[in-house]
Image (spheres, rainbow, N blue to C red):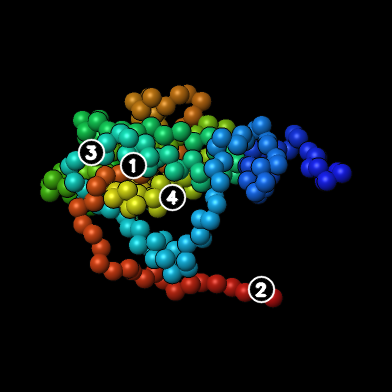
Amino acid sequence: MENEIPVVVAPDACIRCGHCSAICDQDALVNILCPPEGQPLLETFPVLGAEDAERFLRSRRSIRCYKKKPIPREELTRLVNIARFAPTASNTQSIAYHVVDNKDLLAQIVESVIVWMEKEIESGQPFHNSLPGHVLAYRERGVEPIFRGAPQLVVATAPKNLRTKRDNTVFSLAYMELFAPSLGLGSCWAGLFEMYIKAEREHIEPLLSVSPDREITGAVMVGYPVHTYARLVDRDPLNIHWLD
Ligand SMILES: Cc1cc2nc3c(=O)[nH]c(=O)nc-3n(C[C@H](O)[C@H](O)[C@H](O)COP(=O)(O)O)c2cc1C
């Protein structure tokens, strides 16, 4: 503050995080790098009670059975939109989303992932020890183990040269996963698809219209869940170390 007026001390260091104007309830400060139009007043919005918040976070589940009905685009846009409010390193953001909502394209990708898994198994040193089971399920039991029959897939991309591309992606997609149940939707991290991407990036990225300066950094399948869950589950006990 100078003469009771805020002054900019390090303009080049501004990361457009919006703290400076969002903290002021008198509308006294406007930062043109994060304009007020995008900053609605919180007014009296309460912080979620601790018990509700714990239940909200603990009740998110990975959904592996989906209804065939696709999510309308407007609703899916609402879901994906929440991802851009996640924290990112130095507020770099930079994540884009490619939504696959064509079931033939999804089926084509599944087949490519399975063919890659078969090659991996043949090599004698598969990328992951779960691959034979997934191939067997797909080829012999008619199970679709990659996207679990989800009608849509959200693929995140980031600039290749962004140091924190995976971190930014993980936070962003986690926001989306947490928001999904509030829209009556379910989701699941597409880790098997991600394994395939790491190995066959040059094939899949052009197919999903990813520009050459970007790469796929994560993917989550989405849809309407078939089942609901009656209970919360537990995890391993908290592993915490106090240093005093
Ligand atoms: C990085 C990552 C990759 C995952 N990949 C898959 C996957 O390919 N297929 C799947 O069915 N679940 C996948 N999952 C979901 C986990 O299996 C799941 O989060 C875990 O079993 C805990 O269950 P919950 O999410 O229902 O609490 C993945 C989760 C993460 C975080």
Quadrant in which residue 72 is drawn: top left
Q: Does residue 56 lie above or below 183 as drawn?
A: below
Asked whether mark 1 and ligand 1 are closer than 8 Å, the reply comes as yes
Residue 194 picture location, percent across and down: 38, 42
Q: Residues within 10 Å of mark 1 (few under 14, many from 20)?
A: many
Query: Of label 2 and label 4, which has the lower sequence position?
Result: 4
Amino acid under disc 3: Pro
For the point 41% across and 61% down, the residue is: 57
Query: Of label 1 and label 4, which has the lower sequence position?
Result: 4
Of badges 1 and 4, the one in the foreground is: 4
Query: Of label 3 and label 2, which has the lower sequence position?
Result: 3
Residue 230 picture location, percent across and down: 25, 67
Mark 3 to mark 1 CA distance (whole Å): 20 Å
Q: Residues within 10 Å of mark 4 (few under 14, many from 20)?
A: some
Mark 2 to mark 1 CA distance (whole Å): 40 Å
Pointer 1: what residue? 193
Query: Of label 3 and label 1, which has the lower sequence position?
Result: 3
Pointer 2: what residue? 243
Of badges 2 and 1, the one in the foreground is: 2
Pointer 4: what residue? 174
Mark 2 to mark 4 CA distance (whole Å): 29 Å
Residue 49 picture location, percent across and down: 47, 66
Of badges 3 and 1, the one in the foreground is: 3
The residue closer to the viewer here, 10 or 205, is 10
The residue closer to the viewer here, 78 or 244, is 78
Mark 1 to mark 4 CA distance (whole Å): 17 Å
Pointer 3: what residue? 70
Amino acid under disc 4: Ala
